[in-house]
Amino acid sequence: MSAPAIPDSNSPMRRFLKIVNLRPDEAERTLLMFLFYCATSIGAVWLEYSSSTLFLEGYKAENLTWVYMATAFVVTAFGVFYSWLQKLFPLRWVMLGISFLLALPLPLAWMGLMQTKGSFLYLASVFSIRLWVEGIYVLSNINNDIAANQLFNIREIKRAFPLISTGIIVAEIVGGFSYPLLVSLGGVPNMTLATCVMLFLGSALLFYLSTRYRQAFPNFVYRNEEDSEIETRSLQGNLLKYVWLLFGFFIAAQVLFFMIEFQYQTQLEVNLKTEEAIGSFLGIFGGIMGVFKLALQLFGSSRIIERIGVFFAVLMPPVGIIITGTIAGFAPFGLLAGFVVLKFFDELFRFTIVAATAPTLFQAVPDQFRSQIQSFVRGIADPLATGGAGVLIWIVSEVFKTRGIDLSVSSHWFAVVIVFVALIWVIVIWLLRRGYLELLIQSVERGKLSLLTVDTRELRRAVSESISRAETQTEQSVCIDLLTQIVPQAVGESLAPMLAQMTPDLQAQSIEAMLENPETKYLPYINEVMQSPNASPQVQALCLRYVLLADEKNRDIYSLRSYLGPEQNPIIRSTAVALMMRLGDKDQVAEATNTLRHMLTSPSKPERVLGCRALAEAAFMQSLRYYVPNLLADPSIEVRCALLRAIAATRTSEYFPSLIRGLHYKATRKAAHEALVNLGDDGISSLLELAYSDQSADNIRVQAWDILGEIATQASISVLASNLPKSWGKHRRQILRNLIRIPQEQGIEAILELIGRSGIEKMVVQELGVMTEAWAAVEDFSQVTTSEMELLLESLQNEAIDSLERIFLLMKLLYSASAIQAASFNILSGFNPLSGSKSSLARGMEILDNTVDLSVKQILLSVVDNRSIADKLNVLAAIHPHKPMKPMKRLQQLVDLRYCLSDWTLACCLHVARTQLWSLPAETMLACLEHPTGFVREAVIAYLQVASPRSLAKILPHLLKDRDSLVLAQARAISYYFQNNGKNNLNLSDNSQESQDIDTEIKARMGGKPNGYGES
């Protein structure tokens, strides 16, 4: 399966895809899935309308109860039948077979409808068609869900499935408006053949889809010895109660649906006398309903859920049913109009808001139970509710019959029953919300929570409750941090009322969080804390800042003068200075600047530290920049660290290089790191220069990518994404880790937007190429046995493992991170000769096989399998052909590929070349002499000492100034040797010409600035 090409970013197609929130390489799959689901659903809609018309004519609406009860058994049987087929046949053939099977009985049913009305064959055909409609819906939905899960990964399906699911809504519109026309042309019985044609068209689309994306559909039978039931650990406590409430939720929803459907069909039968009238009404009503559902699905449902929260959104359907059911019961406009309105609102909200929020209800369930409970609840609750609704309707109908209650009167009482069941649904939803909050609190306490899927509005309520329940200060502090991450804009709503009961440390933490969005409505709480005699200087300073920033209308800058005196606590004084410099007029700024000047030049270290912090808070440097050079050389590390943060806060660009230099020293590294993160987009150019600098240590260069990831703005994410395809080795690994760590999957979305699925697959193939080169070298070096060669062989094996780790990181961009992490852990454990086992390797390969659908999946599975290196190279030859080489040629090729190898592997190559007396090109040696890692330069020097002593003697003055202590010590030893022994006699005869070449190159290049290293 090859990914489609990425269109130009300014093309009309790319702009359209942005509007519908799709990636370019998802468009074709989404369109084909939409067409398949739409075609199948149009056929199902036609058959549903025609079966309803024929059933009302042949059996009357009162017999629908038997259909509902029979449907419960049929739906359950179809589900079991589908699962049973998967154990016997490959998934692709099961899907295609089921899709084709849905259409096969319809010609036979049509032949039954051609019999005399009222005959046994005719009535049996009508009843069978009515049941078969439910079978079509159930099996086509299963096919659609499974196909979507096979074609899209967990991130893609969030974007694609809402568009695919609109296929049923479009089908209702098209099928509803076309049904009256088709009935007028061919009659109701012939709609069965029309349905058959549409189902065959859907099967053809599914066949093309599964052939076009064959890699996504396994062509083997998946066997799992473990049952897919709930784990042996019993569900207890809050979780067990929540599962029962979920059962109640879905059962109440389904019972209401069928009760409304029953009365709706009854009123149609009573008020519309002919089958043509009933069919036409059903078609037009379905078409209008489809238009409203499509509009609500595309433009309203997500906004409603986001605005009022999941549970208040879920309350809309039962509340709407209570209101419209009451209207239908009193029937001011007639029973037909009342139940049509009731049916309209029920379907409108049920298939939009309820359908969109139903998966969210399972997000509070722990991960190890979630999928099992979801399939367990939905698999049992729906058919159970269908049968239960049939039984309930039958009982109510029989009670009315035995008491001789007229049909019109019983319809009023049915409306009362519907309203009563809707009230039960409301109570279940309210209890479900309480259970949801309790499980969220447990998840918070255990630290197991995903902010990407959970409803943040409900989570905020849960965390707020947990703060008041927490027994220790540490627990409260953790909850405040979590609350700040969830809703930083509304954190004051939860924390402000609790400030007075908090300890000083928690007060400081809370007010700092509230300062991100200060609001006047919380000033009474702040003033209460500020005036408390137990308030610490830090808390008073924070309250002072909050009062000045929140109350803009009544802001009194002049009152800050009382805090500038030396008698004030330095923490409060520095805060007052910062506020006055930031908010005051010219004279006030001058007065505050003078105070701050005294603090910066004070002999007291705490004064200087707080002065630098005030400088950062004021975001004002101006005349005070005169003191920066002296403060950068301050003997106190705390002062230097505080100044680095001030440079970032004031955006003093001439001192940005000081921030970069601060990363090179352990004492100031953390402060420089934080300062560069706070610098944001202004520091991107300096960080990029550092990342590609050959004058900095590799760990410092790698840290530049970490800082870019922590900045996490659109610009920094774009820089990381654009540099990912151009990087290799540890730099690629670090960029990947940072993109994956960025919150809300912004980094993942950025790289997918930039290069798409095809670009990620290309990088996977590149990493497989690195593995090919490493293993090919292992094979070619197998005849050389020296201690240096043993080190090189070990490092080459590690290169292959490193490439595999990067492949797993790349796959996290496409698939579930937890699944890929589990596969990575088991497979890499299997690679370990000490702790690995065949079972862990097999488990990891099984997870990988069932998660990944890359075009090179089979190659990847063969590579991670427990095979010989020769077998793996034969498999890799399909994408990376290679030929055996002589050891010296292979070594030269490895050194040429140094940009994608680790520093240790490169150093091992140079040491092997030295011991085996193998020549290397002059250009390569010059490039390696400029390498940023010291032990690589040391290996080059050791090689030149053997291969070209004359060249080495000429570059010794340059090497004696090297920044690395290892290289410097080596250069001094060689210089001492040359001075005491004269000309070196170790030059190799077969390398004499090479020496001349090196001499020439050194003369030309060593005088200038060293070139960069690590080009991609």
Image: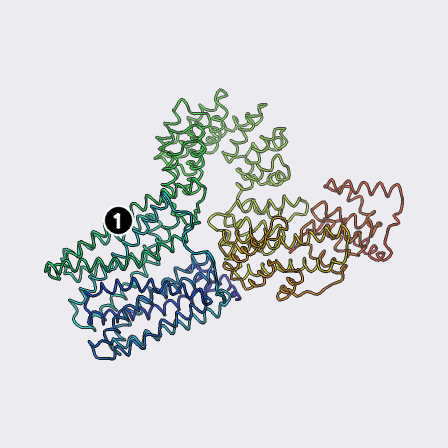
In this rendering, would 933 be left or right of 169? Answer: right
In this rendering, would 264 be left or right of 605? Answer: left
Reply above or below: 873 against 721: below
Nearest the viewer among 689 and 466 is 466
- Rendered-image quadrant of the C terminus: bottom right
Reply above or below: 938 against 296: above
Image colouring: rainbow
User: Where's residue 995, x and y in %?
Assistant: 83, 54
Nearest the viewer among 546 and 242 is 242
In this rendering, would 970 be left or right of 395? Answer: right
Q: In the rendered image, which residue does mark 1 sit on?
A: 426
Task: Classify mark 1: helix, strand or loop.
Answer: helix
**Callout 1 amino acid:** Val
User: Where's residue 992, x and y in %?
Assistant: 85, 56
User: Where's residue 456, x and y in %?
Assistant: 39, 45
Q: How many marks?
A: 1
User: Where's residue 729, x and y in %?
Assistant: 63, 52
Residue at figure coordinates x 47%, y 59% from the top left? 224
Nearest the viewer among 713 and 104 is 104
Alpha-carbon neighbours of circle 1 within 10 Å: few (<14), some, or many (≥20)? many
